[in-house]
Image: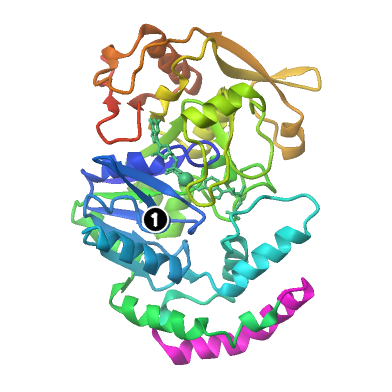
Amino acid sequence: MFTILTGAQFGDEGKGKIIDLLAENYDIVVRFQGGDNAGHTVVVEGKKYKLHLIPSGAIFGRRLLIGPGVVLNPRVLWSEIQALESEGIKLDLGIDAKTSIIMPYHIELDGLREKARTEKIGTTNRGIGFAYVDKIAREEVQMEDLTDPALLEAKLKEIGPAKEKAIADLGGDPTVVRFAPFIDEYLEIGKRLKNKVTDVSSEINIALIEEKSVLAEGAQGAFLDVIHGTQKFVTSSFTTAGSACANLGVGPVMVDNVVGVVKAYITRVGEGPMPTELKGELGEKMREKGAEYGTTTGRPRRCGWFDAVLALKSVYLNGYTELALTKLDVLTGLDPIKICVGYDLDGECIGYPPESTLRLARCRPLYEDMPGWTEEISAALAYEDLPENAQAYVERLEDLMGVEISAVSVGPGREQTIYREEPEE
Ligand code: GDP
Ligand code: IMO
Ligand code: MG
């Protein structure tokens, strides 16, 4: 069985929690894109794990793979491995030989470029965009190069001068490219990781032939996709479900399920349009109640009402077969609860997002009100335990997206998850 899971909004939907839960029933969990810009949280028995590169199946002890479409910072990976192992978590990790390595000059360039922009993107400053630029330009250092000093030296000799020039042009310090002590450090990490280097595509395809199950873990969310998102306020990878096949080297016919993770409201970190953003007290209330601060950067997340117009587009972009709805508990006590069901764009009423980011930024939300509830729901065990109004809210979102919500999350813990029965025929 091959399942792909992606974020349906602007990231931070609670993918880590849902992947951890699903991992119980999978043999392999594999990350297919992004880098340590991701921050996926898993909470088990009150203990919080923040994962940036290691797939969220770690706590269940699954085979964990990092695919060649990921951009990997070896320092971050190494410290994450050590942190998890010191917690007593045994990792069975494989990293594709072709995985692009985030070099210190990518991080330097990310910071310098962002500083120079008049209109900021608000990147996580992890060097993500510049690492992907190098992949497409065929000038990247790959995982395999870290395991062989001669390979790394030859690569840096070839690509180094252009990187030095790029940094100097932006007013930075070009010595980070070739002469810094990081090279020894990277090679040392490469030596330690050498026995983990693998061919991810081959591992997954063989596993599927052997009828094992594979869960592909997406990072970020649909509207941060570099093609279909709110360009230019996006990340630099392909975040939608289709990208899992291309990035992992698995044929599309192998896909059985596509799970979307969707928050009961919406959040965004960084710049870019967000039609339902609540800038006042209500937005702050959501942020505090939902602990909406970035897992990677600690930045406050912008919060707003559920945007069903964007959600419908996300369903189209990903082809979801089912949805997990998270953070319903955060809406307790709000009345009414608003759902954005359309936009007013320059006086015209539309039900699907405009194709251009500039036009999306001009959209004003058109809301439908739903009655709220006051009962705490974070201890609810069954769907029937939820207040009627909460059930009505879940079902209204399901109607608007046209996809079954098979799980409802009411708190960060594993046990705070309500599975819904299959609807009767
Ligand atoms: P990801 O990037 O999609 O994995 O999401 P993050 O981990 O960055 O952010 C989601 C945050 O919400 C984490 O702190 C989770 O522990 C927490 N969380 C997940 N599901 C729920 C839920 O249903 N209710 C509440 N209150 N918190 C949740
Ligand atoms: P997870 O996997 C939320 C955002 C950044 C910025 C934009 C570009 O935890 O959901 P980048 O550093 O990628 O070049 O930044 O993308 N961003 C995220 N926002 N969750 C994430 O990951 C994100 N990864 C990147 O805030 O707006
Ligand atoms: Mg996150």
Q: What element carries label 1?
A: strand
- Quadrant (top left/top right/bottom left/bottom right) for the C terminus: top left
How many numbered badges does the structure rendering display? 1
**45 sits left or right of 227 in the view:** left
Graded by Cα atoms within 10 Å as few (under 14), some (14 to 19) or many (20 or more), the crowding at tag 1 reads many
Q: In this view, does 324 lie above or below 50?
A: above
Magenta span dominant secondary structure: helix
202 w.r.t. 385: above or below: below
237 vs 290, left or right, is right
| Residue 397 in picture, x, y percent from top left | 47, 19
Q: What stretch is highlighted in magenta?
A: 147-172
Q: Where is residue 269 in the image (x, y as percent from the top left)?
A: 59, 42
Q: Does the magenta stretch include residue 306?
A: no
Is 152 magenta? The answer is: yes
Amino acid type shown at disc 1: Arg
Q: Can residue 145 be seen in this view?
A: no
Residue lying at 26% horizontally and 46% vertically, measured from the top left: 23
> Residue shown at 33%/44% (left/top)?
42
According to the picture, the residue beneath numbered tag 1 turns out to be: 31
Percent x, y of residue 351: 64, 21
In the image shown, does 149 or 347 lie closer to the viewer?
149
Whether residue 142 is situated above or below residue 70 in the rendered picture:
below
Residue beneath the point at 47% across and 56% down = 33
Q: Nearer the viewer, residue 129 or 249?
A: 129
Q: How is the image coloured?
A: rainbow
Q: Is residue 264 left or right of residue 283?
A: left
Q: Quadrant of residue 196?
A: bottom left
Residue 126, quarter of picture: bottom right
Residue 294, given in percent of the width and then of the height, sits at 52, 45
Residue 188 in sight from this viewpoint:
yes
